[in-house]
Image: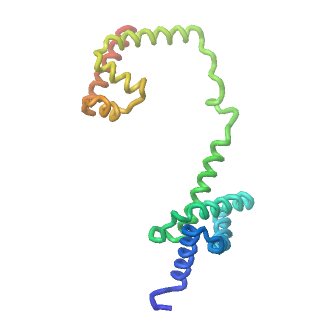
Amino acid sequence: MPANETPLSEDRAHFSDLMDRVGAQQDRAAFAELFSHYGPRVKGYLIRLGLGQAQAEDLAQEVMVTVWRKAALFDRRQASVATWIFRIARNRRIDLFRQDQRAVLDADDPALLPSAEAAPDAHLDAVEQEDRMRLAMADLPAEQMDLIRKAFYEGLTHRQIADVTGIPLGTVKSRLRLAFNRLRSRLEGDE
């Protein structure tokens, strides 16, 4: 063995060669060797991340299937085989965690409960306020009304409005500010 090569670098090169054979030729023997070496290590890693035995086993199997399917994407210049495989395992664990978080719903969560029916006077107040807003907006110059429509009805950001209209970003912001000031003064004057 050359003086600059260690058994560790030989292992890395060996596993990289195996991965290349799997990626290029779908070499089952090479994959079997990768699987027997990394499968138990991935399972142990997932258990250390907090998964139970069965769940870690299932996820380790998924990781190794992903290794088989995506072996052609492996690039030994970017990462070692171990780094690449454990990154896949880590990402799968994160995906599993996110799925678990979405699946747990609290039946008493206020966001999931139907909203209480509004009192009749509250509904009347809302209708009156909507009418006042509509009248105030009708008094705005067309250019300001157009910007408000793009920002609030179409949901565009200030940058997107500037891009769509060809108006400089600073001008978009100042025109929106002027429109809001006009609306505020008009609505406060109506009260």
Instruction: Say whether residue 42 is left or right of residue 128.
Output: right
- Of residues 130 and 83, the one nearer the viewer is 83
The single residue placed furthest to the front in the displayed view is: 25
Name the residue: 60% across, 11% down. 119
Residue 155 image position (x, y, % from top left): 42, 29
The answer to whether residue 75 is left or right of residue 161 is: right
Residue 151: give x, y in percent of width and height: 38, 27
Asked where in the image residue 156 lies, by quadrant, the reply is top left
Relative to 179, is 59 above or below? below
Q: Where residue 140 sits in the image (x, y, percent)?
A: 31, 14
Comparing 152 with 115, the one in front is: 152
- Report the residue at 57% width, 74% height from top: 18
Write the residue at 61% across / 56% down: 93
Residue 26 drawn above or below residue 96: below
Q: Quadrant of residue 43?
A: bottom right
Judge whether 24 appears above or below 189 on screen.
below
Along the line of sight, the residue nearer the viewer: 13 or 187 = 13
Number of numbered labels in the structure image = 0
Q: Position of residue 45 (x, y in %)?
A: 64, 65
The C terminus, quarter of image: top left
> In which quadrant of the rendered view does residue 150 lie?
top left
Q: Nearer the viewer, residue 187 or 66?
A: 66
Residue found at x 34% / y 9%: 189
User: In the rendered view, does 6 fall on the left or right side of 138?
Assistant: right
Q: How is the image coloured?
A: rainbow
- Looking at this view, name the residue that lies furthest to the right: 54
- Asked if residue 64 lies left or right of residue 130, the reply is right
